[in-house]
Image: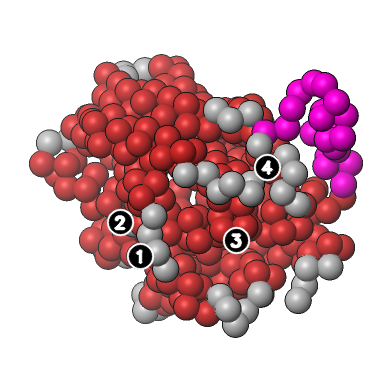
Amino acid sequence: MRLDKPIALLAVAETIVWAGLYYIFPALLVHWEADLGWSKTELTGAFTASIAMSALCSPIVGNLVDRGHGAAVLSGGTLIGGILIALLSLVDSLPVFYAVWCGLGMAMSACLYEPCFMLVTRTRGVSAKRGITLITLAAGFAGTVSFPSAHALVAYADWHLAVQVAGAAVCLVALPLMIAGTRELERTRTTHVPPPAASSGAHAAVQPKKSAFLANPTFWLLAIGFSLMAISHGVVINHLLPLLKERGVDAAIAVAAASMIGPMQVLGRVVMMAVERYISNFVAMCYCFIAVAIACVLLIGAGAWPILLVGFVFLQGSGYGLTSIMKPVVTREIMGETNFGSIAGAMALPYLACFAAAPFLGSLFWEIGGYDFALEVVVGTSIIGFFCYLRAATRAGKTA
């Protein structure tokens, strides 16, 4: 598979952005809880607010990408995110902690996978899956970068240094790559991809109404299915270290397990590249839901049988890792290419809202019945999400 220049630049940029802006939270959660004196629920509430803000901004971001402003959106989000994550080192009150994370939510809505894949889909058309796959192959190592590096920086100094280094990496390394990659992507845009829809005049008259997809039940089935997947993964990834600690798993093993989810995401994507000519997008997407459900079942038993962590890491990593690729691909396949940015942005709203709620919901589930109960719930959400996707694909005739 040929690696073109803009995709390569975006792949490295997305890896650093995900490591520095997103995975930094679960990597430092235990340290914040110990150092700042705030409860797990209070801390995860900030991350919930962050992702909720990202969800609210996603439809706007999608519309901007449709209008041809994708490069500016991604670059601006990266810059603001890097500054804010570094400023987190100065925070000493819970309200300010929440305010910074809300700002980070807005920044992440403009620079993580959703807007990146919107831009790739818009500029690469039917070839978008290849670019998306290559970007996620690299960015799958974001957690592998974030968890051990944050752990090492905290051991060397404290969490303040960890967020300062993260901010510097995003601003000084990821931002130049993001600017160059997005500009080159627009410059080398595939010629057959239609330009952004006109907003007025005779041409606009033949364009479907941008919000027409909201009346389509298939859209909502997809949105619900992906949103339930977001809850499942969000609860697990954000609570993985305290969850394993509660089970008596050694801290070093817990960090290693969390760090290996990223490589397993990459492995899942590599396998997908090898077999994509033999299996349909439908089969690949079904695997994602089923793998995450089984992974949570294995995690329930990992306290008694730590060897089950191996299966958990592989299934959770490969299942959710493939979701990053398949979500935009099957959305385009089922919903069509017209106004894709608006469709993807609208679908990201409930998806990110559920991802936002996941850390907080995980804390609530833990308070109700411990992490066993939390894992039982997310097994259920994965299964229900699978049947929602199955129904959407059936309605669209995309089950082959």
Q: Position of residue 155 (x, y in %)?
A: 14, 44
Image mark for residue 326: 3
For marks 3 and 2 on the same chain, the one whose residue lies earlier in the sequence? 2
Magenta stretch holds residue 209:
yes
Q: CA–CA distance between discs 2 and 4?
A: 38 Å
Q: Is residue 219 visible?
A: yes
Residue under the point 80% across and 21% down: 200
Nearest-to-viewer mark from 4 and 3: 4
- According to the image, label 2 marks what residue? 144
Q: Is residue 238 left or right of residue 59?
A: left
Mark 2 Cα shell of 10 Å, populated few (<14), some (14-19), many (≥20): many
- According to the image, label 1 marks what residue? 263
Q: Position of residue 260 (x, y in %)?
A: 33, 64
Q: Is residue 61 left or right of residue 72?
A: right
- The reply to whether the C-beta atoms of the residues labelled 1 and 2 are less than 8 Å apart is yes
Residue under the point 59% across and 67% down: 288
Mark 3 Cα shell of 10 Å, populated few (<14), some (14-19), many (≥20): many
Image mark for residue 194: 4
* Amino acid found under the numbered disc labelled 3: Met
Residue under the point 28% across and 40% down: 31
Image mark for residue 123: none
Q: Is residue 273 left or right of residue 294?
A: left
* Amino acid found under the numbered disc labelled 4: Pro
Magenta stretch holds residue 236:
no
Nearest-to-viewer mark from 3 and 1: 3
